Image (cartoon, rainbow, N blue to C red):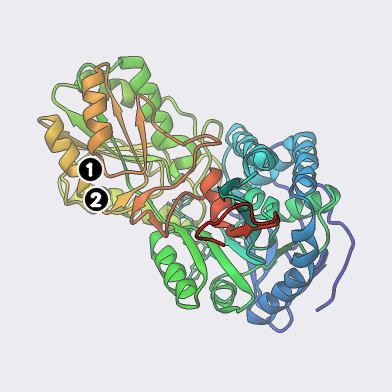
Amino acid sequence: MTPSAAAIGPFAARSEDFTPFTTARHWIGGKWCDPVSSRATQEIANPRYGRAMGEVLLGGADDVDLAAKAAARAARAWGEWPIRERAHVLYRLRELMVRHIDELAWLVSHENGKVFGEAKAEVEKGIECVEYGCSLPNLAAGNQLEVSRGVACEVAYAPLGVVAGITPFNFPLMVPLWMLPQALVGGNAFILKPSERVPLSSLRLAELLKEAGLPDGVFNMVQGGRDAVEAICDHPLVKAVGFVGSTKVAKLVYARASAHGKRALCLGGAKNHLIVVPDADLDLSAENIVASFTGCAGQRCMAASVLLAVGDVGHILDAVRARASKITLGKDLGPVTTKAARDRIAAYIDAAEASGAQIALDGRTANPVAGGYWIGPTIIDHCRPDMPCVREEIFGPVISVIRVPNLETAIEIENSNPYGNASSVYTSSGDVARRVMERVEAGMCGVNIGVPVPREPFGFGGWNDSCFGHGNITGWDGYRFWTRQRKITSKWALQRDQTWMS
Ligand code: NAD
């Protein structure tokens, strides 16, 4: 390990122009360092150009061990800070993030591909999560009650010690901030394993946390992929694992971390259905449906993927198509994450077309910037429920339309998909809205809104194959996940009476 305290400093870009950045190294004990034994590296591509803007050094078990030991050394003292003082670090982090918001947004935009406005919205949502962390001292007061004469019971939230978070490529800054505020204010030391495709935003986050006054070792970061994740799941010092990513890996991480007796909450993939009925408001529905399936190039776990068109809604489908065809790729919408993702998405569209679906809007030939991983908004109409484009997560700006005769059929199709992240209905009828809200198998539901993300303080989390473990990752559930309750029963007063606890 060659540690270095030198700051990497700000990312220079203030436009979409190709801008290289630093090598992503580990951050352990408040210093940058290289992997102990692995020499493996991976390119970090800017997806707009399909060109490397940096590289990441891929760590493994040795590096996780160093990070866990550094975290364990720091955890005790940090856990003894009063909760308000721990939250004050987040107050300062919030100010730093606001001050550097454009820099952070450009960094997210360059490494992930989303356009600047989307990237800035991501940073703003990350700031909202930090603000929730700032409010925790007011929420975590616990409870105290005199349960019998002279005997008091009290609940206090104690840290777990060393905890870890593993995050996906699609929200490089926001998803780590789904976990960090609650875990840190809860008094834990944290190990982040960011996506190896987008580790650069987290590098700046590490430096901003240090500048905000977080003691060395309380936040650590190990770069890498599967080896690092498995080492985190196996390491005896790590007491809890939060994961966000695909269902396949969420299941693996949940099983492996749980097998080692760790607390685990693993959020997986999604296949979100929208239901539109004839009485829906035309403009509101069309605008929302398009924003939901195209925003962030469809690479949101809350993105619409299937549209269940109930009865005579041809006018709404026409408006959706008209709006989606006006999107300028490269300006309103960014590329997808890799060439493999681009080719996989195109293959789903090819297969649907070959099986008889109609491509009402075709993004397959879009290529606004040479070399980038581009695919434009695509509408696959007249799909059948058994088609792969309807059954499987595509994770691109594609919506599959199934025409159904009634609401019952729409709800049945929605409920037959194994995922359960989000589902929305477009209607002007309170009765229709309530029937859908009561019956869809989804943890986050919307009425006339295409991306029904529960904003803070409401917790984020899906059902079924979209979530393994109990509860939500954000909000109060997050604080409960990263802490354990200590129940204290005390008796200081002289015996005032006979009770069964005497
Ligand atoms: P991914 O599952 O490929 O990777 C997520 C993390 O797991 C990364 O840090 C990666 O390094 C690690 N990883 C990958 N393969 C692994 C393996 N075999 N063993 C151990 N670790 C491994 O996901 P992604 O492609 O980065 O992100 C997209 C997915 O994340 C989509 O499925 C999307 O729906 C999902 N997602 C879900 C939510 C949610 O809240 N439910 C939020 C964002 C993204």
Q: Residues within 10 Å of mark 1 (few under 14, many from 20)?
A: many
Nearer to me, 52 or 142: 142
Marker disc for residue 414: 1
* Number of numbered markers: 2
Residue 53 at x, y percent in the picture: 69, 56
Asked if residue 124 is positioned above or below residue 427 in the image, the reply reads below
Q: CA distance from mark 2 to mark 1?
A: 6 Å
Asked if labels 1 and 2 touch by Cβ distance under 8 angstroms, the answer is yes
Q: Which residue is pictured at 60% across the width and 79% down the height?
A: 236
Nearer to me, 268 or 401: 268
Q: Which residue is pictured at 58% across the width and 77% down the height?
A: 231
**Circle 1: element type:** helix
Marker disc for residue 417: 2
> Which residue type carries mark 1?
Glu
Asked if residue 229 is positioned above or below residue 190 in the image, the reply reads below
Q: Quadrant of the C terminus?
A: bottom right
Asked if residue 438 is positioned above or below residue 31 in the image, the reply reads above
Residue 417 at x, y percent in the picture: 24, 50
Nearer to me, 281 or 150: 150
Mark 2: is the Cβ under 8 angstroms from ligand 1? no
Q: Which corner quadrant of the image does residue 447 belong to?
A: top left
> Which residue type carries mark 2?
Asn
Q: Residues within 10 Å of mark 2 (few under 14, many from 20)?
A: some
